[in-house]
Amino acid sequence: MIVLEKRPQPSKAWSYATPLVAVVATMVFGGLLFAILGKNPVEAIGTIFWEPLFGEFSFYYRPQLLVKGAPLVLIAIGLSLGFRAGIWNIGAEGQYIMGAIFGAGVGLAFYPLDAWYIFPLMVLAGAFGGWIWAMIPAFLKVRFGTNEILVSLMLVYVAEQLLASVSLGLLKNPEGFGFPGSRNLQSYDAAHNAELIAGSGMHWGVVAAFVAVIFAYVLLNRHMLGFHIRLTGEAPRAAKFAGVNPPRLILFCLGVSGALAGLAGMFEVSGPSGVVSIDFNVGYGFTAIIVAFLGRLHPIGILLAGGLMALTYIGGEIAQSQLGLPAAAIQVFQGMLLFFLLAFDLLTNYRIRAARSEVA
Amino acid sequence: MTTPLLSLQGLTKAYPGVVANDHVSFDIAEGEVHALLGENGAGKSTLVKMIYGLVKPDSGTMLMRGQPYAPSEPRAARADGVAMVFQHFSLFDALNVAENIALGMENPPPMGDLAARIREVSENYGLPLDPYRTVGDLSAGERQRVEIIRCLLQDPKLLIMDEPTSVLTPQEVEILFETLKKLRSEGTSILYISHKLEEIRTLCDHATILRLGRNVGECTPSETSARDMAELMVGAVLQTPERAGRAFGPVALDVTGLSVPSPSEFGTALKNVHLTVRKGEVLGIGGVAGNGQDELLGALSGEILTTADAIKFNGQPIGRLGPTARRKLGVLTAPEERLGHAAAPNMTLTENALLTGSVRENLETRGFLKWSEARVFAERIIKSFDVRTPGPENAARSLSGGNLQKFVIGREVLQNPEVLVVNQPTWGVDAAAAAAIRQAILDLAAQGTAVVCISQDLDELMEISDSFAALNEGRLSAPRPTASLTVEEIGLMMGGAHGMEVAHV
């Protein structure tokens, strides 16, 4: 019989190795899945991981990595602060939508004025939109003890309805021939989150993601607030003993994750997407949860995980179009990644030992 | 010689990294009270778990009345007439006594018959108990009665009791001993596990002493002095803490009319607690666990806020201040629960040093942490308090209980507190470490710190405290000088027998 034995302390080696082991296991079992679907597994895996980076059309795909990775990293960084403290914001998707609506709303309100301050105002509005949406579960939790998982998740669907409403009404393009969706911000220079270097994929959202990574790293490793966040996650009673004010921590963590998700939405709507439309959100807020865990809730890890996730997105799309893999197979493949990560994670705190059966 | 009831021969059990029992052999005679004596970690629990079928020995045999005895599970042990009362009760608060007992039975009889049986047995052994009372309303002593009666209903040949008096007042201990003596007179053998030497001397016929998993000696307790037994148990000559005679300064901590509800559902609210501690004074607070100790510590540490004037430090009201503000003033605390409350299990000792040390040891500037200073502070605690660990980068959970306790107490002591409140400072700590911790507390008091020591170990409180008060159902008795107190008076302060009927045996 196999037994799990708790390690006296977490294994450093395994905590670094598990993400790599998880990726390898995903490749193996994903390959198996593709083989069952009748595709050449080596070719499929190669298409997903190789093609976007070094393939024939990589000049097109590489910028896409930044475009897809940035919102994931930005949102995941915010989520990771709360997750570290045991505060579960599952509604980043909703905060992302609200950030986009608020940001785009401010931009469109100024249309067609051309002024330097419009874009900064949109940034603030986007952050505010995400923040205020996250404050709803935060306030309800602090005041009434509601479960933030449920409230934040349900608010995603409220945000989606709101998105549909403004796309069809308030923010609808008056010159859009009745089609749903707002004016395209890409063609409104003062509000356009354009690429900083043409063709690089590098826009302000990417910059914000990198800044967030550094900010989170310093916060968690060098600052008392970060220490208190980690302490609250590790041992809530000890945190209270150390002087942490739990309600304040809840407001801070949910607020920051909401604001960052809002920023991601704002940068997306004013840049790569350009338009507030019914199908504006594509699940970044949910995928960011995977990214946060894949990156072990560590800022640098999240940066790498965001890149990896973006890679599977883009590679998955290529595999769909070139090899005819079903979209569902790609989603299973991404799900495997999280599954294997969580499974192998056990080895950080436990070791596997063969043992005789015993009643203990 | 007659055949013993139970004979253990060369029992050995090893866990990864530690040999819990190493060739332990001894006999338990029919109708004797046999003490199993040893410090925490000496292997007493593992040994009784083997007898009760919870753990299988790696090698060695047991004979019951000459027949091989190797229970594969507790059920088999019970079938062979072995019953056990655990230190921690396994009772459902919401059910009544009879229902709780029925749950533990293989084929429970109808409730009416069972209740009658419970009445009969409990009257017989001087443990009156109403089978229809809800367990949630019972005192610790009464809950223990439920567990004992549950065992007695099986008509055991051998009754194992694991530290039964740790939850009892001295008066309740008296009642229990009468019951045990009656059982013995009827021929039941009792294996009595404890580290309280005086108890063993009054009750037990024979004692086996374990140290580091080995049987290091046997004795007849009534003919051996407590000190000799203690030294057998510890394996060294014991240092008694020294206390220099000293004068007390002005009042440092003044608690007046402190009433707070408990933050937890099954906690005990504090009701109108008054206490004062002068500089240099050690106030001992006794009482059975669960009578408001955690709540009192929480109220003093700032985890539970009270009205401002309920707690005063040097005349300044601090009832509304949180833990950080109180630390800044010099009011430091060390809670009972080491892992999860006083320390974060998965964090390093450096991080745990930072946990309470950041304010007074200057380990942060405007919120930014000084890791190297924190590490130095952790190293200082490790060195001054002889904490056995490879270094401050190790996780708190990798330390043994005693070592972590030394770290947790040392962390507060080294911050030069004005007021130090400790809860169960030597709980689960070996005798040598306990002596070191008590000495550190006394040294601190000698330097003028006002100390409040909450403990369930009466011997400890008698040893170190200048005055003594007891918590009982959230109320604190008036403090009295320790020197003039008798055991009976202490027992009465702790709530006496909690209105339990005295044994009629």
Image (cartoon, rainbow, N blue to C red):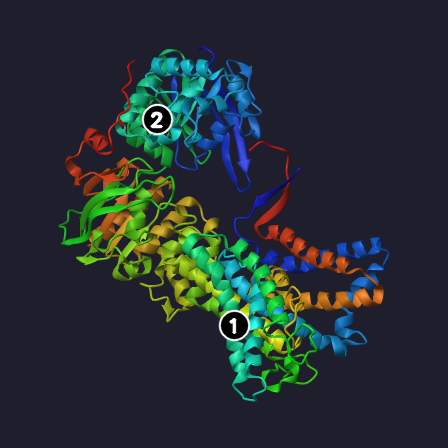
Kindly tell me whether residue A97 is visible in this rendering: yes
Give the secondary structure at mark 1: helix
Neighbor class of circle 2 (other Cα within 10 Å; few <14, some 14-19, many 20+) is some
Is B29 placed above or below B14 here? above
Circles 1 and 2 on the same subunit: no
The reply to whether dot 1 and dot 2 touch (C-beta < 8 Å) is no
Q: How many marks?
A: 2
Q: Is residue A199 left or right of residue B123?
A: right
Give the secondary structure at mark 2: helix
Whole-number angstrom distance, CA of label 1 to CA of label 2: 59 Å
The chain that hosts pointer 2 is B
Observer-nearest residue: B416 or B237? B416
- Where's residue A71, x and y in %? 61, 70
Residue drawn 64% across and 62% down?
A287
Kindly tell me whether residue A215 is visible in this rendering: no
The chain that hosts pointer 1 is A
The residue at which mark 1 appears reads as: A127
The residue at which mark 2 appears reads as: B142
Q: Where does the C terminus of chain A fall, quadrant-wise?
A: top right
Q: Where does the N terminus of chain A fall, quadrant-wise?
A: top right
Q: Is residue A340 left or right of residue A211?
A: right
Observer-nearest residue: B183 or A356? B183
In which quadrant of the rendered view does residue A212 lie? Answer: bottom right
- Where's residue B132, x and y in %? 39, 22
Q: Is residue A309 left or right of residue B249?
A: right
Is B361 placed above or below A150 here? below
Type of residue at label 1? Ala
Observer-nearest residue: B59 or B216? B59
Type of residue at label 2? Glu
In which quadrant of the rendered view does residue A157 lie? Answer: bottom right
